[in-house]
Image: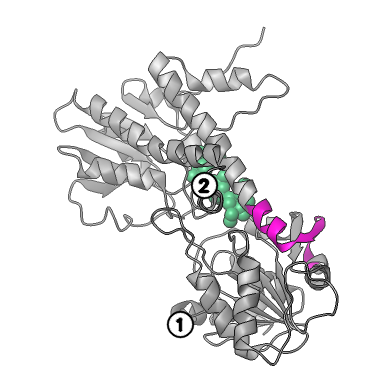
Amino acid sequence: MKICVVGLGYIGLPTAAMLASRGHEVVGYDVNQKVVELVNAGQAHFQEPDLQMLLTAAVTTGQLRASTEPETADYYIIAVPTPVRPGGAPDMSYVEKASAAIAPTLKAGSVVILESTSPVGSTEMVAEVLRHARPDLTFPRYKEEGADADVAVCHCPERILPGQMVRELVQNDRIIGGLTEACAQKALDLYQEFVTGTCYVTDSRAAELVKLSENAFRDVNIAFANELSMICDKLEVDVWAVRELANKHPRVSILEPGAGVGGHCIAVDPWFIVNSAPEEARLIRMARVVNDDKPHRIVERVTRLADRFKNAVVACYGVTYKPDVDDLRESPALEIVETLAKADGLQILVCEPNVTELPAPLAGLNNVQLVDAGRAQRESDIAVFLVGHRQFKRLDPNQFLNKVVVDAIGLVSRPNARGV
Ligand code: SAJ
C-alpha cells in the first residue's frame, strides 16, 4: 500500500514511521523544508521515547521518505495543526490547505483520513474542498449510503499521549468515523493492520465529537481538581490530603491539581465544542476559565510571599507543559515563570532538566538563569514546584524545610494519609 502522511509533526511523524515499519511505502508530505530534510536524514525533530529508533529503521530501509510535495497514494492521512483563534473559533486553515494540496494527486480508490482533532462537520468540509477541486471524481456525502464514491473520506482522530506515543499508536482503541459506512470500512482495513486495540466504527460527526469529548472530559476533571486546590488554599486545608482521602471512596477519582493545563490539545479542543454550542457548553467553558486562571493564582501567591524578602531569589522547578517531556507548548509553568521574571525585583532560577537553554520568552532576561537542582536549592529563598519531572521526585523534601515553598503539584508537601 502507498500512504501519504500529510504533516510530519507530533502525530504525523510517529504515524508515518509506524506505517513504514509495517512494510508500507510511506511518503511524508510537509510544507516545512527543514522538517523534510531532517526526516530524510532519519532525524526526529522532537523528543519522544522510541520514535528515533522507529524513524531510523523506516528511513534506512527506504520505506519512509519525506517531500515538500504530496504524492498519489492509496491512503492519505491528514495530521496538521487545528489551533484555536483568539475568541475560541477553530482555525481550520491548515486542514483546508492540506486538502487543497492533495486534491490534484487523488485517484479513484484513494481513501482520505483526517486525524487532526477537528470541530464537528470538518470531515464534510474536507470532502467539499476535494469535490470542488476534482469535478472528475465522485466524493461521499454525510450518511448518504448507496453508490460507492470514487474517493472515501473519514475521520479517525488521533488519541496518543505525548510521552507514550509509539506504544499508544499501536495499543489504543481507535474510532473510525466514515462519511458513509463504505468509507469507514476502507479506513478500518488500514487501522486493523497495526492497531492491537479495538477499532470502533461510527459516522464522521460522532467521531469528531468523541475526540473533543475526551479532551473536554479531562479538562473539566482537571478544573475540578484545580478549583478544589483554590478552595483549600482559602480555607487553609491541605488539598493533597483532601484528594487522597476523598479518592478512598470507591466512586471518587479526583485528578491532580497543578500549575494549570497546557499542551496543544486539552487547553484548545474544548473551545471547539464551546464554539459549536455556546449556549449548551456552560460547564466546558467554565472549566477552561478555571484552568486558565490557575497560573495567575500561583503568581499572586509567589509575589505575595516574595514581599517578605528584599530582592527574593525564586527557584522555579519545571517549565514544560507536563512532566518528563521537552514540550513547552501552551505551558502554564512557563507562563508563571515569565510573569514572575517580569515582576519587579525578583531573581529567577529556572531548574528544568529537559531543556539545555532558557526557552525563548525567558532568554535575554538578565534576572533569569537556567541552573541545576543543587544550585536552585542552595541559592533560593522561595522554591516553586510547577512540573513533576521524575528528577524532581527524587529530591529530598527535607532540603526545603527552611524555605518558603509554593508547591503547585504536591511534590514535597504531599502527605501520606494514615490508615488505622
Ligand atoms: N494535568 C493536570 N492534572 C492531571 C492531569 C494532567 O494538571 O491530573 C495537566 C498536565 O500537567 C498538562 C495538561 O493537564 O498540562 C494535559 O496533559 P495530559 O497528559 O492530560 O494530556 P495531553 O494534552 O498531553 O494529551 C491529551 C490526551 N487526551 C486525554 O487523555 C483525554 C491524549 O490522549 C490525546 O491524544 C492528546 O491530548 C491529543 O492530542 O488530543
Question: Quick check: 214 above or below 159?
Answer: above
Q: Which region shows up in magenta? A: 194-211
- Name the mark nearer the viewer: 1 or 2: 2
Q: Earlier in the sequence, mark 1 or mark 2?
A: 1
Report the residue that reaches farthest toward the bottom.
136
Instruction: Please indicate, yes or no, whether residue 183 appears anywhere in the rendered image.
Output: yes
- Look at mark 1 in the image and give the residue it sits on: 33
Determine crowd level at label 1: few under 14, some 14-19, many 20+ residues with C-alpha closer than 10 A: few
Determine crowd level at label 2: few under 14, some 14-19, many 20+ residues with C-alpha closer than 10 A: few
> In the structure shown, which secondary structural element does the residue marked by tag 1 occupy?
helix
Q: Does residue 172 show up magenta in the picture? A: no
Question: Quick check: 324 above or below 233?
Answer: below
Q: Is mark 2 within 8 Å of ligand 1?
A: no
Q: Residue at x 62, y 19 (%)?
A: 246
> In the structure shown, which secondary structural element does the residue marked by tag 2 occupy?
loop
| Image location (x, y in percent) of residue 311 | 15, 33
Q: Nearer the viewer, residue 183 or 316?
A: 183
The C terminus - image quarter: top right
| Image location (x, y in percent) of residue 293 | 39, 37
Q: Nearer the viewer, residue 231 or 419?
A: 231
| Image location (x, y in percent) of residue 272 | 54, 54
Identify the disc placed on residue 278. 2
Q: Residue at x 39, y 43 (%)?
A: 333
The answer to whether the residues at label 1 and label 2 have Cβ atoms under 8 Å apart is no
